[in-house]
Image: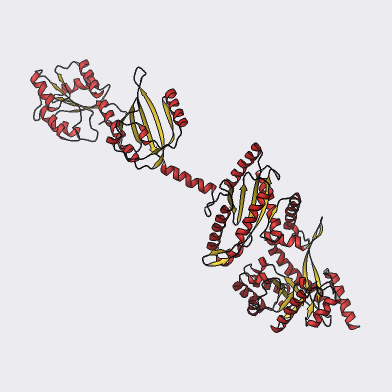
């Protein structure tokens, strides 16, 4: 059967070739033609893949007549629907009736009138195409995955398809005669439906997203198209609604939306969503002359949790922080997670700065409470910076940067605190950024120098070593204090290449002093936490010292208490590896951190250095003197050497000598000196000792 756009195929069946020739001549200009001279060959051709669209069948044929062929055609499912026109010389009513009873579609008598033949064929192929179209339309209506509902002009439901029933849950019998309001969700107001019907009246068409209700009561979204149908006189006769259930699509959209605008761990808005909400808030503040606050928050000890308990515990902590933050603000405020342990809040329509301060204080108190991470109690806390809208700016980026700057000042002030942004902070922040940019080039531009502060025996005043202190000679700023650039180098990772440069430079200087004939000295070098925890530290430092031809025993490595206590297991291994190579190890600023007997017994430490804060107030502060005395006794009992830092007066030196402290360094002995000045100082000191 013809299903494409090619001409219809007609099978002509007659035992006389001349009759076939006449029929073919009359039809071949409009149709494709196949011929058969017997009933048997006709049946064979009719059942091939290229099924004819129409058969002209002679009745009187030898062997198998036309009636027998038609019986076979109607009995075979493959050929049952093919239209058949009988062609015969018998023009009796009885003959025509018998053919029609067998299932013939039309009857032509010989001799054939060609115009009549052409008209009958054309009409039959057309009363045939209409049947096929109707059958196809019915199949599409019933089998499409989209729900279809047909109503009359008064919106009474006349027909629905199977998909309609599957989607809504209503059966055909339940829905016929009702109106589409039976599935109304009540999610849309009257204005929505008024606008929809207005469009239908004006354009005979409406499409859009609408929420409906299933028979179960479940609300679901669908995409609906409604077309008005009019009769030839232009009068409205029907409405046809076609819809698809877009629940899965909406769920996918929601997932994509959450991925794009929400943090997957905490469920809070992410940086993109925060920026959008802040822009909206800026518009509202301008329009209604309100005030708002931006709170930039950073956890104080989050890295320690990740490093000691693992990232899974860190994730639990972040989720709990998010929960506590949401508990501290109103429902219409915004709590967002920017990245890592950074959170940011928008407090909407606040009365004054004090209102923001109260929220910030409550946040600090809340986050200072312990967190239970899989049975492990940890403390973190947070530092909060606050910028005010419109006081501190009316642009999103400016407000965020200023809250960030205020947060850094809160952290510098001791952590667990909040600070408001000030113009002075802005100036300091800009200076900080500028200084960091210059710091990135300081090493390659050879702007770093090492100064050396002598260390001496308390009793004999004999020099035995020095501490190498890093100085930055900025070409415009001059000498930059270490307290300004060392924390910056720690944050941006520059402390690692700078630290290696210090080790190499100390080795080089020791070699120069040795070549000058100066006595053997031990030089102390400070290791930062980031340096100490870098991979293969012992091997890297050992290689540098070996390359420079210096004995490791001439290098003393100083670390703070907090540095060696962090990751104590790996710290023990690193300290042991350094000690095994021959380096001397000292705990710097002792007394200000953990001051634990346990780690002193476990770590291969050689020296304790009493922090200057305990020495500088002697003899005026009895408590500090008592701490210094206790450290000296502790070091003596453990067989460790002890060095007092920050000694500036004879009274302090006398106290240390009385308590049995072995070594000191400080301004009483000498300020830090450049290498050439240190060499001169050492020569003078040696000469004075001989005198």
For the N terminus, the image quarter is: top left
Task: Answer yes or no: is residue 508 visible.
Answer: no
- Tell me the quarter of the picture where residue 503 sits: bottom right
- Image coordinates of residue 529 in percent, x first then y, are 67, 67
Q: What residue occupies the far right of the structure in this picture?
A: 691
* Number of residue marks: 0
| Horizontal relation, residue 174 to residue 686: left or right | left
Residue 514 drawn above or below residue 209: below
Q: Residue at x 74, y 57 (%)?
A: 441
Residue 70 pos. (x, y %):
14, 29
Q: Is residue 40 toward the left or the right of residue 379 in the image?
A: left
Q: Is residue 511 above or below residue 112?
A: below
- The x, y position of residue 413, in whole percent, is 71, 59
Q: Looking at the image, which is closer to me, 645 or 615?
A: 615
Instruction: Give the camera-side residue of 177 and 540.
Output: 177
In the rendered image, which quarter contains the C terminus? bottom right
Residue that appears at 39% across and 30% down: 226
Is residue 63 visible from the viewing direction of this image?
A: yes
Q: Is residue 125 left or right of residue 439?
A: left
Counting from the top left corner in percent of width and height, residue 10 is at: 22, 26
Q: How has the structure been colored for display? A: secondary structure
Q: Nearer the viewer, residue 528 or 404?
A: 404
């Amino acid at each position: 059967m013809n299903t494409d756009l090619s001409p219809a195929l007609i099978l002509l069946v007659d035992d006389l070739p001349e009759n076939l020739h006449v029929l073919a001549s009359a039809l071949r200009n409009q149709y494709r033609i196949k011929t058969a001279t017997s009933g048997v060959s006709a049946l064979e051709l009719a059942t091939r893949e290229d099924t004819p669209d129409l058969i002209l069948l002679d009745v009187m044929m030898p062997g198998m007549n036309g009636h027998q062929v038609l019986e076979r055609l109607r009995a075979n499912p493959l050929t049952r629907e093919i239209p058949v026109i009988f062609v015969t010389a018998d023009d009796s009513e009885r003959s025509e009736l018998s053919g029609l009873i067998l299932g013939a579609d039309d009857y032509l008598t010989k001799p054939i009138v060609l115009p009549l033949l052409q008209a009958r064929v054309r009409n039959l192929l057309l009363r045939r195409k209409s049947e096929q179209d109707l059958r196809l339309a019915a199949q599409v209506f019933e089998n499409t995955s989209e729900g279809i509902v047909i109503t009359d002009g008064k919106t009474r439901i006349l027909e629905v398809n199977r998909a309609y029933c599957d989607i809504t849950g209503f059966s055909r019998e339940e829905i016929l005669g009702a109106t589409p309001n039976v599935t109304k969700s009540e999610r849309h107001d009257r204005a929505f439906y008024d606008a929809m019907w207005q469009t239908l009246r004006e354009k005979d068409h409406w499409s859009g997203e609408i929420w409906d209700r299933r028979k179960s009561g479940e609300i679901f979204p669908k995409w609906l198209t409604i077309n008005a149908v009019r009769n030839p006189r232009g009068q409205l006769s029907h409405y046809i609604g076609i819809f698809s259930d877009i629940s899965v699509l909406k769920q996918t959209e929601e997932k994509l939306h959450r991925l794009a605008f929400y943090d997957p761990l905490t469920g809070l808005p992410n940086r993109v969503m925060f920026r959008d909400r802040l822009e909206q808030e800026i518009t509202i503040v301008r329009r209604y002359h309100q005030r708002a606050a931006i709170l930039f928050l950073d956890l104080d000890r989050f890295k320690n949790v990740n490093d000691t308990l693992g990232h899974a515990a860190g994730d639990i902590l972040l989720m709990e922080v998010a929960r506590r933050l949401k508990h501290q603000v109103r429902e219409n405020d915004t709590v967002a997670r920017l990245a890592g342990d950074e959170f940011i809040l928008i407090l909407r329509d606040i009365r004054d700065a004090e209102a923001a301060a109260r929220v910030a204080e409550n946040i600090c108190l809340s986050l200072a409470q312990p967190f239970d991470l899989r049975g492990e109690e940890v403390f973190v806390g947070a530092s909060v910076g606050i910028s005010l809208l419109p006081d501190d700016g009316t642009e999103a980026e400016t407000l965020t940067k200023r809250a960030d700057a205020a947060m850094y000042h809160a952290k510098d002030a001791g952590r667990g605190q909040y600070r408001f942004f000030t113009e002075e902070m802005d100036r300091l922040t800009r200076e900080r950024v500028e200084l960091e940019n210059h710091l990135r080039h300081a090493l390659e531009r050879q702007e770093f120098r090492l100064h050396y502060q002598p260390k001496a025996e308390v009793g004999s005043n004999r020099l035995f070593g020095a501490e190498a202190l890093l100085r930055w000679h900025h070409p415009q700023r001059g000498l930059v204090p270490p307290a300004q650039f060392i924390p910056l180098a720690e944050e941006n990772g520059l402390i690692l290449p700078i630290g290696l440069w210090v080790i190499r430079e100390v080795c080089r200087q020791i070699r120069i002093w040795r070549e000058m004939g100066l006595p053997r000295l031990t030089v102390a070098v400070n290791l930062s936490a980031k340096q100490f925890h870098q991979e293969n530290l012992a091997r890297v430092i050992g290689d540098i010292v070996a390359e420079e031809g210096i004995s490791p025993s001439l290098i003393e490595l100083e670390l703070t208490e907090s540095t060696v206590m962090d990751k104590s297991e790996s710290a023990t291994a690193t300290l042991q590896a350094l000690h095994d190579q021959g380096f001397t190890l000292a705990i710097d600023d002792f007394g200000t951190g953990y001051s634990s007997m346990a780690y002193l017994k476990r770590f291969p430490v050689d020296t304790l250095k009493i922090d200057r804060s305990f020495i500088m107030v002697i003899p005026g502060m009895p408590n500090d003197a008592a701490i210094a005395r206790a450290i000296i006794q502790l070091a003596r009992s453990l067989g460790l050497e002890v060095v007092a830092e920050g000694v500036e007066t004879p009274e302090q030196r006398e106290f240390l000598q009385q308590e049995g402290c072995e070594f000191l360094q400080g301004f009483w002995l000498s300020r830090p000196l450049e290498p050439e000045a240190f060499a001169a100082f050492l020569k003078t000191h040696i000469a004075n000792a001989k005198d």
